């Protein structure tokens, strides 16, 4: 009987090795194809970025239709972009948009954290109906509210007649409804054990202390995510800014860069448009680099039990 078992094992061993070899081969082929596909997609994704970067140094200010890369390079596009303010004041647009994005990021972060904490940790009347209403409301695209927001601002008298009013008005518009987007933050807070809240309450902590000393340190990864979202929304928005801002003199960067591509400006401003695109991407890159460091540190140091 033992000899028969040994014979069966000897016969089955080559077949098993063959199957394992086939599986390994398929895995290797699959990995190679996946890496080739990702490499090709990365090149396709990087081509416009590389092109716009080199185009920002193009000495020829009009669109280049003969060669892919410029033939002559200069830094004048960046210099003129921030120094020549007679036609389009990009420096003012950049600073104006930066202020709006920073204020909106801070306000929206506070709103989302507050609403998410209340929905996740507190129990009160109309809690579930409010969550359902916010969920249904979030199904509608924000662009549907553009005209209503415009007429509301007119009725209230928030006219964009100065830099201060533009910053104030757009900050209100961008951050007013951000509290309704609490679902992602609430989902993360739901994973935090309620025993932490109960232990802190027994130690004499108030709800505010539980929120600031217990919940916020654990939710740092989601705070980083919400801060990035809160900054990018006003920084890259075109539709709302174009509708709300009635004067070209108070444009943010998105409508301002759109204006550079109009027929009366494109032949003098196309290279500067490329330089503006590079400048606009710099704060985003800095934000991602800084926030990624905090995200990694918070994930390494946070322990939930």
Image (cartoon, rainbow, N blue to C red):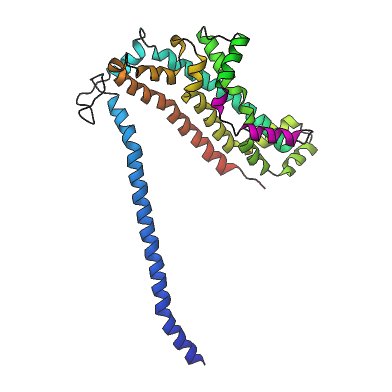
Q: Is residue 210 visible?
A: no
Residue 225: horizontal and vertical position, in percent? 55, 35
Q: Position of residue 62 (x, y in %)?
A: 26, 19
Establish if 46 lies above or below 167. below
Q: Is residue 99 above or below residue 140?
A: above
Magenta: main secondary structure equals helix
Q: Toward which corner of the image does residue 67 lie, by quadrant?
A: top left
| Residue 150 in picture, x, y percent from top left | 56, 16
- Decide if residue 34 is on the left or right side of residue 271: right
Q: Nearer the viewer, residue 2 or 179?
A: 179
- How many numbered marks appear? 0
Residue displayed at 41% across by 27% down: 281
User: In the figure, is residue 189 to the left or right of 233?
Assistant: right
Does the segment drawn in magenta span residue 100? Answer: no
The residue positioned 34% from the left and 21% from the top of the image is 273
The residue lying at 49 percent from left, 36 percent from top is 292
To which quarter of the image does residue 44 belong?
Answer: top left
Task: State the residue at coordinates (41%, 77%).
Answer: 15
Q: Is residue 32 above or below residue 68?
A: below
Question: Which of the two residues, 157 or 294, is positioned nearer the viewer here?
Answer: 157
Q: Is residue 124 magenta?
A: yes
Image spot of residue 118 (x, y percent): 71, 33
Residue range of the region highlighted in magenta in the rendering? 122-145
Observer able to see residue 55: yes
When asked about the image quadrant of residue 122, the answer is top right
């Amino acid at each position: 009987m033992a000899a028969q078992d040994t014979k069966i094992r000897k016969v089955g061993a080559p077949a098993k090795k063959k199957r394992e070899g086939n599986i390994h081969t398929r895995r290797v082929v699959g990995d190679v194809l996946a890496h080739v596909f990702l490499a090709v997609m990365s090149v396709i994704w990087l081509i416009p970025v590389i092109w716009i970067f080199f185009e920002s140094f193009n000495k020829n200010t009009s669109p280049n239709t003969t060669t892919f890369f410029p033939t002559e390079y200069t830094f004048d596009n960046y210099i003129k972009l921030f120094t020549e303010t007679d036609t389009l004041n990009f420096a003012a647009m950049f600073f104006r948009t930066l202020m709006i994005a920073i204020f909106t990021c801070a306000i929206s972060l506070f709103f989302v954290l507050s609403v998410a904490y209340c929905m996740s940790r507190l129990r009160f009347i109309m809690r579930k109906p409010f969550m359902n209403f916010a969920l249904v409301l979030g199904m509608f695209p924000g662009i549907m509210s553009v005209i209503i927001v415009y007429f509301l601002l007119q009725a209230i008298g928030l006219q964009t007649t100065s830099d201060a009013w533009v910053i104030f008005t757009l900050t209100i518009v961008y951050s007013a409804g951000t509290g309704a987007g609490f679902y992602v933050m609430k989902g993360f807070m739901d994973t935090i054990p309620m025993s932490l809240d109960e232990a802190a309450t027994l130690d004499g902590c108030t709800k505010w202390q539980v929120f600031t000393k217990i919940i916020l340190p654990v939710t740092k990864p989601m705070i980083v995510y919400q801060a990035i979202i809160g900054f990018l929304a006003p920084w890259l928005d075109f539709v709302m800014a174009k509708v709300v801002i009635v004067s070209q003199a108070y444009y943010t960067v998105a409508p301002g860069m759109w204006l550079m591509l109009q027929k009366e400006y494109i032949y003098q401003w196309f290279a500067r448009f490329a330089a503006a695109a590079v400048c606009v991407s710099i704060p985003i890159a800095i934000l991602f680099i800084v926030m990624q460091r905090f995200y990694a540190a918070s994930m390494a140091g946070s322990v939930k039990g």
